[in-house]
């Protein structure tokens, strides 16, 4: 996996900036055949409305590709090329890389597979040596490349009808694996997150985890860094970069190859040396990362970090329109090392005045199945102002007679004006989904189970303590 | 919570049968006012197309209710009444229960709240004494009652536009909590499960956990029993019934009130004495129950039990069209106490013949991102026949160029013909959802993360061992 040792590494986090905001892109392997990867990538640039210059390159073709003038080589373009996206068979890549060097191409994303991950380390090294000779930083090979919804760059060679498109937002996601990358990209879009940057970096021949974390830590559009890694090559540098990144913004991580057998699978996947997970876990913890145990947790954690303020306190108030889920939430709070808040006497007496007599003023606050927007608002108003409350779990069951769009609007309103973290639990079907979307569009994180909501809140509190130095 | 001790318990599991298949139903508290619970229940019976006789009862009204002749009392009906659904203020229930007794009503579901759960134990006991005097078994009070999509009985008083409607199927769900009940009911419908019976039993004044588990164990439409409980009143009887049920069919359980604070919340919710969770856990384990740690796990487990055959073996083969998720799945397999299968030499050589050269014939089998229906079929054909394989995890990423509806159809086909458990992992957005639905409609359980899929498979294997006496 390592490049030839006698050649200096070219790529840095600044190279990624060039790739994310190129003024001109050459798509090498561009084709009119919709089955070809180069076709899909070129089509992406057109579909996204990318405003820079695009040059289709195909050494076997004269004439237009997708209605654009094509070239047999980057050397024929005769204009500056910021980024070459290379989507041709692996064996042909070194020669093309040389042409890129001669043409003064500034950076390259090699999406082609067939290098170190299938044992062709020499081929990968050969390509790398050429790139380094011409000072071309590389992402890849064996990757999906990058997506930036803001600059409208998208090198992902997957049919666009198969993947939902995320809106512009604050979550950036980097993945060594293209499969994990594209499926989580799809989930991010489907669950309504906003995306800042997506980076699938495959074999990491040149640009690696260290460069990526430095780039995302410095990227002003990125609020939360989400990372899937299988192995890290430059351990010490990674640790330093990780700690620095964590001081700037939260990092949520999932590692593939935690078990011995998983590590073997990772090695045959991206030629990664997964190493002992204990060592990784120690690094992640010392760097203040939120460690996700599963893909769903990765998204659950990202959601709360993307939308909610930090707090080091762990006293959680629960308000609910269904008693049983309040019970489950209470269990989940204690199982995740948090505690139920004890409201002040003042809050209790205020609540007693606004709640109907049937409501027992205690924590969790079970407002009963007929709770409407007024009752949700009254409870949120009192509880959010209580100095004994650090964060709030709102259980809004939209199956109940009183819960409707006004309840969702009320929760959104309070989410906007209070400076304490709030998470919502709303399990359910179609009617609930509509209101989940309503809430998430206004920055309220919604979960379908108390466990997921509470674990995410615990991750937020844990990170807050890390940031304040109390962990 | 306990009825007056000097009166014998009336309800048994056979009483529930009467309530699920009544020839005639009286809705007490029926109303033309759509805000009234009695209105919603009556409307449900009309909407569902219930074929028995329905008698609206309202003591304040002459004339029709929802176009049907109404009566001031059940005593005025002058025809047999199998079930009375009582939806009136708590204070009025004892008198109405007496009228039911005098009219020879065979069973009653008391949906009204305002009894033991708010401290009115005497009122509940008074009602219960009358019911017992007239030998009327009761579900409730403080509950949603029952739903049976086959007999079209539905006493759930929640607006039908807020809850998805499940199709007829094999999962039965009983919940002490109405809130947990209705939200999981909604999720069951939304996730495409088929429902056999739904029972929300609230304060369990008469019919309780023991009767319900006996009923569902005996119910021939129920393949899987799913249970939310807060407390059990008749511990020894419950344990005996639980063990017996588990020998007939799988039981998935989640308990509210696991922590001390959760137990307090449960007590104020349904007046349940939650007791020590360790004791409950021991009983559940000895009874072979699958214990869900969260609401989502409850559904995850139900899905695999509802659709897949049992196996006591724990050698899992993985086939995937994305390497990274194969790595995560491998980790999940070992973290859940299972192992990757070692294929026979014969299987390996067969796979080598049908897979392209780039595919490394090992476990997990990474078939590469261009795997199509043919490749999925070839892999499933060889692996399902391998004697070293006990169960299969299929990772089908529908973002990839090769994966489409034919891949889903191929997986469905093999799910139908092989006699080993199979679970599918397909994380993604809209395009994936369509194919998830395709798969689940043919009885393939689909999960959005390797963790959920593998945990569910482990629960299935654990239960299989219990059934075979090897646990």
Image (tube, coloured by chain):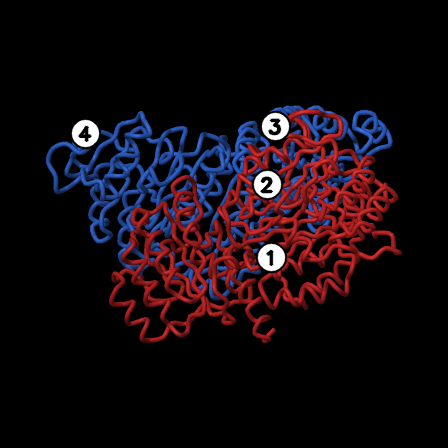
Chain colours: A red, B blue
Residue annotated with mark 3: A66
Q: Residue B423: percent from the left, percent from the top? A: 64, 36
Residue annotated with mark 2: B427
Structural crowding at the residue carrying mark 1, measured as other residues with C-alpha within 10 Å and reported as few (<14), some (14–19) or many (≥20): many
Residue A202 visible in the shown view? no
* Quadrant of the drawing holding the N terminus of chain B: bottom left
Mark 2 secondary-structure assignment? loop
Mark 3 secondary-structure assignment? loop
Residue annotated with mark 4: B68
Chain for mark 4?
B
Mark 2 and 3 residues: CB-CB less than 8 Å, in contact? no
Q: Which is more toward the observer, B380 or B297? A: B380
Could you tell whether A176 is left or right of B85 in the image?
right
- Name the image quarter holding residue B463: top right
Q: Nearer the viewer, mark 2 or mark 3?
A: 3
Mark 4 secondary-structure assignment? strand
Q: Residue B394: percent from the left, percent from the top? A: 67, 35
Q: Which is more toward the observer, A264 or A224? A: A224
Q: Are marks 2 and 1 on the same chain?
A: no
The span from disc 1 to disc 4 (Cα, nearest Å) is 62 Å
The span from disc 3 to disc 1 (Cα, nearest Å) is 35 Å
Chain for mark 3?
A
Please identify the residue farthest to the front as the structure is shown: A78
Residue annotated with mark 1: A225
């Amino acid at each position: 996996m390592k490049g030839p040792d006698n050649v200096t590494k070219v790529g840095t986090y600044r190279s990624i900036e060039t790739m994310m905001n190129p003024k001109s892109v050459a798509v090498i392997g561009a084709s009119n055949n919709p089955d070809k990867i180069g076709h899909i990538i070129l089509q992406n640039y057109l579909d996204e409305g990318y405003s820079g210059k695009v040059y289709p390159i195909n050494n076997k073709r004269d004439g237009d590709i997708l209605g654009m003038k094509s070239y047999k080589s980057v050397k024929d373009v005769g204009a500056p090329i910021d980024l070459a996206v290379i989507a041709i068979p692996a064996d042909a890549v070194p020669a093309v890389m040389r042409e890129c060097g001669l043409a003064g191409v500034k950076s390259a994303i090699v999406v082609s597979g067939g290098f170190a991950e299938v044992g062709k380390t020499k081929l990968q090294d050969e390509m790398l040596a050429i790139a380094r000779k011409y000072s071309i930083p590389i992402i890849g090979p064996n990757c999906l490349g990058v997506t930036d919804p803001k600059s409208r760059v998208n090198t992902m060679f997957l049919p666009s009808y198969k993947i939902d498109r995320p809106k512009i937002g604050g979550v950036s996601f980097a993945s060594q694996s293209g499969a994990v990358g594209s499926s989580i990209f799809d989930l991010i879009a489907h669950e309504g997150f906003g995306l800042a940057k997506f980076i699938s970096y495959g074999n990491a021949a040149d640009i690696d985890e260290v460069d990526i974390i430095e780039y995302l830590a410095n990227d002003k559009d990125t609020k939360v860094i989400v990372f899937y890694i299988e192995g890290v090559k430059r351990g010490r540098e990674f640790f330093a970069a990780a700690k620095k990144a964590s001081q700037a913004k939260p990092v949520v991580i999932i590692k593939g190859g935690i078990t011995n057998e998983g590590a073997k699978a990772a090695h045959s996947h991206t030629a990664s040396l997964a190493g002992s997970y204990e060592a990784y876990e120690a690094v992640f913890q010392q760097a203040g990362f939120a460690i996700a145990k599963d893909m769903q947790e990765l998204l659950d954690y990202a959601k709360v970090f993307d939308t909610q303020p930090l707090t080091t306190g762990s006293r959680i108030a629960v308000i609910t329109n269904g008693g049983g889920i309040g019970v489950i939430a209470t269990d989940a709070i204690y199982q995740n090392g948090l505690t139920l808040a004890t409201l002040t006497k003042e809050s209790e007496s205020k609540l007693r005045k606004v709640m109907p007599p049937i409501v027992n003023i205690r924590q969790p606050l079970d407002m009963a199945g007929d709770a409407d927007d007024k009752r949700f608002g009254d409870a949120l108003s009192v509880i959010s102002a209580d100095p004994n409350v650090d964060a709030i779990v709102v259980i809004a069951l939209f199956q109940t007679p009183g819960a409707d769009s006004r309840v969702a609007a009320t929760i959104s309103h309070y989410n906007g004006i209070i400076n304490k973290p709030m998470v919502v639990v709303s399990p359910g079907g179609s009617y609930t989904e509509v209101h989940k979307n309503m809430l998430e569009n206004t920055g309220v994180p919604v979960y379908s189970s108390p466990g997921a909501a509470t674990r995410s809140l615990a991750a937020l509190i844990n990170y807050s303590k890390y940031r304040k130095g109390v962990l």
